[in-house]
Image (cartoon, grey):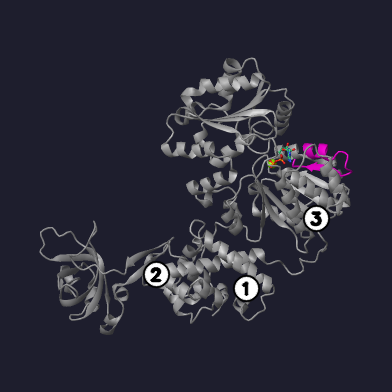
Amino acid sequence: MNISELENKTVGELSGVGPKSVKSYASLGIETIADLVKMMPRGYEDRSHRVCIGRQTGDGLLTNTIVTVLGKSKFGKGLKSVKAVVEDMETGVRAEILGFNRPFLDHVIYEGCIYHLYGNQMAQDGHRIAQFSQFELKPVREEELMRPDAVINGGMLAVYSLSGNLTQNIVRRDVANALRNITVIDEILPSNLIEKYRLIDYDSAIRKMHNPLCEEDIVNSRRTLAFSEVFYMQLASMRRPAGSDIRRSTEKRVYEQESRFIANLSFKLTGDQEKVLDEIRTDMSKSESMNRLLQGDVGSGKTMVAWISAVHVIAEGRQVAFMAPTELLARQHSQNAAKLFEKTGISVAYLDGEVHGKSRQLLLEQLAKGNINLLIGTHALFSKDVKFSNLGYVIIDEQHRFGVEQRNALFRKGENPDILLMTATPIPRTLALTVYGNLNVSTIKTMPAGRIPVKTFLVDSSRRQEMYRSVGVELSRGHQAYFVYPRIEADEEQQDSSGLRDVETMYGYLSTRQYPQFRGALIHSRLSDDEKIKILNDFSEKKLDYLVATSVVEVGLDVPEATCMVVEHAEVFGLSALHQLRGRVGRSSLASWCFLVYEKNISDDGKKRLSVLRRTNDGFEIAEEDLKIRGPGEITGLRQSGFTNLKYASMDRDIEMMACARDEVAAILKDDPGLLSVGNSVIRQNLFT
Ligand code: ADP
Ligand code: MG
C-alpha cells in the first residue's frame, strides 16, 4: 500500500478511536492514519534485557524476566485480590505477585503457565520473598521460548508524546491497529540507495520504529526514515517546475556598460570579487536561473559585487530588486547606489513602508513601465501592488533575516529571476551545502587590499579606564569610535537584577566624564528612522566623533574612519553578533581595535567563548565555533529555513546524511529529470500517487 493512500483516512476511522481521541491526536498534529503511522516515538523503554528476580541493579528494582506460575490463590475482601507464586525460569528464585483488587487476574493467570513479568519489585522490608504489586504479566507460549531473548523479554517499547485522553497503551494499541490493517507499505527509495547506505526497506523502517526488538532496530529504522525525509526534502527543493527552464542561453559575457562601471571605481576589485563575479556571470548565462549564496565577512566587498552584477542584468534590459532587512540599511544602500550610478544612465529608486500616496503611486507606475532599472528597499518590495515590467534579478542582503515565505513572494514577481542571497553571517560550509539544497555558494575570503586586521582585546571590567584612555587617543587623532551596550535605558528594577549597562546612562557618563571635548550621539532602536539616518549621516560626515549605541549598529554600517569598537557586557552577545559589530571597524587602511569588555562574574566557558574572537578574524571559523557551542538549530537563519521542522532527521546528527541525500538527488535529476526511469519509479509513485 502506498503511504499516501493513508493520507485520506482520518485516525477516527480506526476502530476504538473515538471523537475524544481524534481531538487529542489532532493537538499532536496527527489527523490521518498516515500521520499516526509516521509518528516518531519520543523514546523507548528498554525491555530487551532480562533482569531476573533479585538480580536488579542500580537504584530501581525493575524486573524483566520469564516466570512459571507455581500456584495462585484469592484473598482479601470479597476475594477480589489475586496472589500468585512465580518462579524465575532462569534462576529458580521465587516471588509473589499481588494483584490487589484485580479479580480479572484470576482469568489470566494459570498454574503451570509461562509469563513475561515486567514490574517493580516492592521494597523487601522484612519479607523473605520478593513481592510485586505493580506489574505486567503477559503469557508466553512454549514455542515462543525458542525466539530471541529480546522478544520474550518484551523488546523495546515505544514511548509516545501524549495529549488529552491518550495514554501509552491507547497509542500503542492504535498504532498496532493501523499497522495491522496495512499489508505492506510501498517502498519510497530506489533500491540502489537502500543498498548503498545500508538502509532497510520502508515498511520495516516504519514497523520497527514502533516495535523494535533491540537498539539496532531503532538505529536502522531512524536512519532509513531520516534519509528518506531529507531525500524528499532535497528533491522538492531541487526539482524545478516544468517550463521554468525556458530562458536565454548565451555565452558568458561582460557587457560594455559593466566594464565601464568597473573601470570608474576608485579601486581595483579583489581576486575574490572577480572570481565571484565570474561565477555569477556564468550562472546568468545558463538556461536555468541562478540561485546563489554569496558569503563573505563584513566589509569584504559583497555589496560591490551585487552592484556590478546588477549592471550586468540591467545591460540585458531586465530590472533588478535589491532588498535589505531594515529601513536603515536599505536607505544606506540606496544612498550609496545613488552616488555610484549617478552618471551611468541607470535609474535607481527607493521603496519602503514609509513611501506613501502620490510618490508611491508614481514610483509604481514608473516601475511597471520599466523606467526604473534598480529598485532598492525593504520587505515593502513584497507588497502586492509592486509590479515590475521585467524583473530579472533579485538581490537579498543579510538573507538570514528574511523568512522563506517573504523571499518566495518576491521571487514570484519575476519570471524565475536570478537570485543572489548575501550574508555576512556565514553558514558553515557543510550546513550551507546541505540545508540549501540546490544553492550554489560563492565565498569572498580576502579583504580589499590595504585592510589591517582588527586587533581584538578582552578587557576585564576593572581595566575599563585604561581602555577609555586608549580610545581617547584615537579620538584625538580624528578617528571615530562606537560604544555598544546591551540595553537602551536604565530600568530601576532590572538594573538591579541584570546589572547591565545601558546606552542612556553610559552616554551621560561618556559625554560628561570621559570625552567632554568630543562630539558624541546616542543611537538606538527607539529613535525614528529619520533621526537614526541623521545621526549616521553626521557620523559618516565626521560631524560626530563617537556613537553610543545598542546593537542597531550591527549590520551594514560603513564608516571608514571609525577605528574603535567597544562592546561592554560582551558576554551577553552571541559570537556572530560580536563579529558583526567588530566588522564596523577596520573598513579602511587605518589600524583598528575592538575591545570586548566583560564583567567579573563571567563564567570560564563564557571567557573561552570570547577568546575565539581574539584568536580569529575569520567569520567562518567563528560560525563553526558558534555551531559547536550553540548547535545548528540556533544558528541564525537555519531556524527560519524550515529545515528544523524535520521529523526524523536532526541538524545535529545528520548533516552528513543531508549532504549525501543532496548529492544523490542532484545525480538522479541530472540523469533523469522527469524521474521516468524504472529505477526511479518508486520516487515517481511516491510523489504522484
Ligand atoms: P560588504 O557588503 O561585504 O560588507 P561592501 O561591498 O559594502 O562590503 O564593501 C565595504 C567597503 O569596501 C565599501 O566602502 C566599498 O566601497 C569598499 N570596497 C569594496 N570593494 C573594494 C575593493 N576591491 N577595494 C577597496 N575597497 C573596496
Ligand atoms: Mg553588507
Would you place residue 680 above or below residue 446 in this image? below
Badge 3 crowding class, 10 Å Cα cut-off, few under 14, some 14 to 19, many 20 or more, is: many
Q: Secondary structure at mark 2?
A: helix
Q: Residue at x 67, y 24 (%)?
A: 479
Q: Give the number of the disc on residue 251.
A: none
Q: CA distance from mark 3 to mark 2?
A: 51 Å
Q: Amino acid at mark 2?
A: Glu
For label 1, the SS is helix
The percent coordinates of residue 515 (x first, y second) are 61, 17
Instruction: Name the disc covering residue 392, or none.
Output: 3
- Res. 95 image quadrant: bottom left
Residue on which disc 1 sits: 687
Viewer-side residue, 86 vs 372: 372
Circle nearer the N terminus (1, 3): 3
What range of the chain is rendered magenta? 335-353
* Whether label 2 touches label 1, CB < 8 Å: no
Is residue 336 within the magenta segment?
yes
* Residue 31 visible, this orientation: no
Q: Position of residue 234 (x, y in %)?
A: 61, 64
* Residue on which disc 2 sits: 216
Q: Residue furthest bottom?
A: 143
Residue type, numbered disc 3: Gly
In the displayed structure, 348 sits above or below 32; it is above
Q: Earlier in the sequence, mark 3 or mark 2?
A: 2
